[in-house]
Image (cartoon, grey):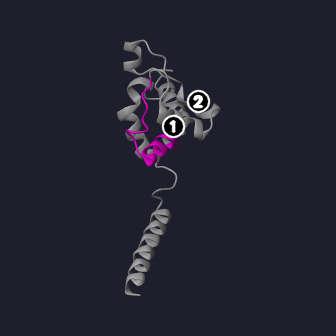
Amino acid sequence: MERHRDRMGRSGAGALLALFLILSGCGSGGNPQDGERIYAKHCGSCHGEAGLGDGPTARLAGLRPANLPAAVREKSRAEILGTISKGRQAMPAFGRILTDAEREAVYQYLRTLPEKRAAVFSLDRSRGQG
């Protein structure tokens, strides 16, 4: 009987931890700010700062990475996450490099790229550069 109570106590603590993580936002969705950091480290050199496929590594290697704002508009979340996980053509697979949560954070960040591009374009135009 004591053993049964011990198991119940552990499973109850696990349930409380899961509830806490869900309510605090961990494990659900993805944080675009974390995604931006991960994108800068693993993706930006090929896809470029705005995700247009114009990063310095891509230019040097003669690669044509995807235009990510267009891809996010045209493809489902599952397709984008699948490409991040499995790779595509010259793009490496990140399924064993990034956790599920990190890949989700990158996806959430990719959804913000059109907004960032518009903000940069607006700033450039106000400076007479656009």
Q: Amino acid at mark 2?
A: Ala
Of residue 118 and residue 24, the one placed in the foreground of this image is 24
The residue under label 1 is 110
34, above or below 124, in the image: below
**Circle on res. 125:** none
41, above or below 12, in the image: above
| Magenta region | 91-108
Residue 122, percent across and down?
Answer: 52, 30
Is residue 93 located in the magenta-colored stretch of the structure? yes
Of labels 2 and 1, earlier in sequence is 2
Q: Is residue 110 visible?
A: yes
The answer to the question of whether label 2 and label 1 lie on touching residues, with beta carbons closer than 8 A, is: yes
9, above or below 78, in the image: below
Kindly identify the residue that appears in the image at 42 percent across and 28 percent down.
92
Residue 22, percent across and down?
Answer: 49, 63
Kindly identify the residue that appears in the image at 45 percent across and 48 percent down.
101
Residue 119, percent across and down?
Answer: 51, 34
Tag 2 secondary structure? helix
> Dot 1, crowdedness within 10 Å: few (<14), some or many (≥20)?
many
89, above or below 115, in the image: above
Q: Amino acid at mark 1?
A: Leu
> Dot 2, crowdedness within 10 Å: few (<14), some or many (≥20)?
some
Mark count: 2
The residue under label 2 is 71
Kindly identify the residue that appears in the image at 41 percent across and 14 percent down.
59
Q: Is residue 115 visible?
A: no
